[in-house]
Amino acid sequence: MSHALLALDQGTTSSRAMLFDHRGQVMGMAQQEFPQYYPKAGWVEHDPLEIWQTQRNVAETVVKKTGLKPADIAAIGITNQRETTLIWDRETGDPVYNAIVWQCRRTAKMCRDLQAEGFDTVIRKRTGLVTDAYFSGTKVAWLLENVPGIRKRAEHGKLAFGTIDSWLIWKLTEGRLHITDVTNASRTMLYNIYEHQWDDTILEHLKIPRSLLPEVRPSSEVYGETNLLGAAVPIAGIAGDQQAATFGQTCYAPGLAKNTYGTGCFLLMNTGTQPVPSNNGLLTTILWQLEAGGPITYALEGSIFIAGAAVQWLRDELGIIKSAAEIEELASQVPDTDGMYLVPAFVGLGAPHWDPYARGTVVGMTRGSNKSHLARAILEAIAFQSMDILDAMNQDSGINLAALRVDGGAAANNLLMQIQADLLGVPVERPTVTETTALGAAYLAGLATGFWESTDQLEANWSIERTFEPRVDPSHREAMIAGWQKAVARAREWVEE
């Protein structure tokens, strides 16, 4: 009997593969970083072949490292950086251009033009999304307009568009499957989340041929098989990384919410089977669908573009720390930021502001400001941005959150988690297994193959490693928030077209 599930977790800066047992515990992990490309200011790209190569490497490595055979693996679940967009040739499998990353701002003007003509209201009404360069739709339109010769090939059905899940499955199945799941489809700005199909009105407006698009499937289903490991293993789960993390955090009841602290920060709240429109700059998005024809669960989501990436900036661009983990010790050397605020709008601001023209800003420095103050300001900025989203979420949903579940790499930072609890005024709960993105992909694949029988079993696996209780004085919290709001105002609309 198979006794492990393999999760392929394709992220923004690295590809990972993880093995999980029946208790949802990690059996093994392999990880490999890959290059980021910045051809122009505000542009971010990946090489799709490097993504595939690193993902294949780590999958093979973790299985070899743990001594498992293909027969020991019940299924593969896939989770991925969302919105990142690529187009490839159906015959050769070669990408026509680099993947345009979710962080890339090259289509900001295109989005402004859509807003100016009022089409953003159509997009919002049908997709639940704001019109922003973050999403895939305008990236596809840009590729068709700017890569020589590909529009005609696309119109003749010779090319395929996909987010990273689609690309990996195409490669894993040697071109037999061109599919995505409902969660990734809902992030393209091309999918009608109410009618559950690609939206012809939006496709026509953006001049995107329907033949480019993948088939949309549930998040938990046996889609096909791969021989990547030397023998056939089913591919049985797909979810965008934030939906996968929410599933791994077992937020199965309406009102439960989690925040993932990764390259960006993503806060999702389960709102049940009815989509909740946002009046406060949040997204209405599909959380998952567990079987074909079954109910679709929705969420409110707030997306922060720069979270852990600000720590990487401190490490890679300023050289102040040598590893991301060092920021906690450096920031702990001062009791506060001494009035310094950093707004990490390096690629604009996401929810709830949606300002692609904001830019990174540091305010409140004095002659006594030092690197410890800067390090602490970065941690506070991550927590402040999350606070802004949760405030908007409370207003939209009418639910005041009792506690926040957290995961992602930066969730291991105790100082950050304490700052987050202090700013929110509610407990922050860190689970025993914080790799919930990969865990969620494994859970989805496991449910489809009978490895687990129900979500009740998954809830029984979830346990808290540590709870961070708020301990800051409310008046001090209010003063910190007021300073943050002033700093954000300084960063807004910095770039002029």
Image (tube, grey):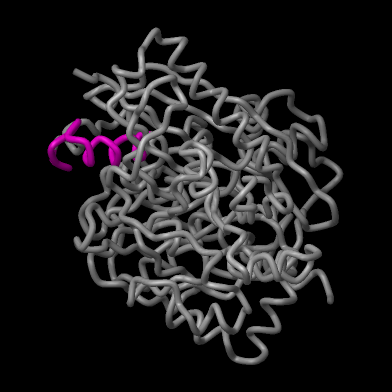
Does 30 appear above or below 263?
A: above
Residue at 40% in and 65% down: 285
Q: Position of residue 417 (x, y in %)?
A: 47, 39
Q: Residue furthest bottom?
A: 117
Give the left or right position of residue 188, taking residue 258 as reference.
right
- Residues shaded magenta: 439-456
Quick one: which residue is furthest to the top in this view?
A: 67
Q: Quadrant of the N terminus?
A: top left
Instruction: Please determine whether, in this image, residue 422 is positioned above or below residue 162.
Output: above
Residue 297 in view: yes
Where the C terminus falls, by quadrant?
Answer: bottom right
Residue 154 percent location from the top left of the image: 64, 66
Q: Position of residue 267 (x, y in %)?
A: 44, 54
Up/down of 296 relative to 232, above or below: below
Name the residue rendered at 57%, 23% in the picture. Answer: 57
Residue at figure coordinates x 23%, y 67% from the top left: 273
**On the image, which quarter does residue 153 sit in?**
bottom right
From the image, give the main secondary structure of the stretch colored magenta: helix
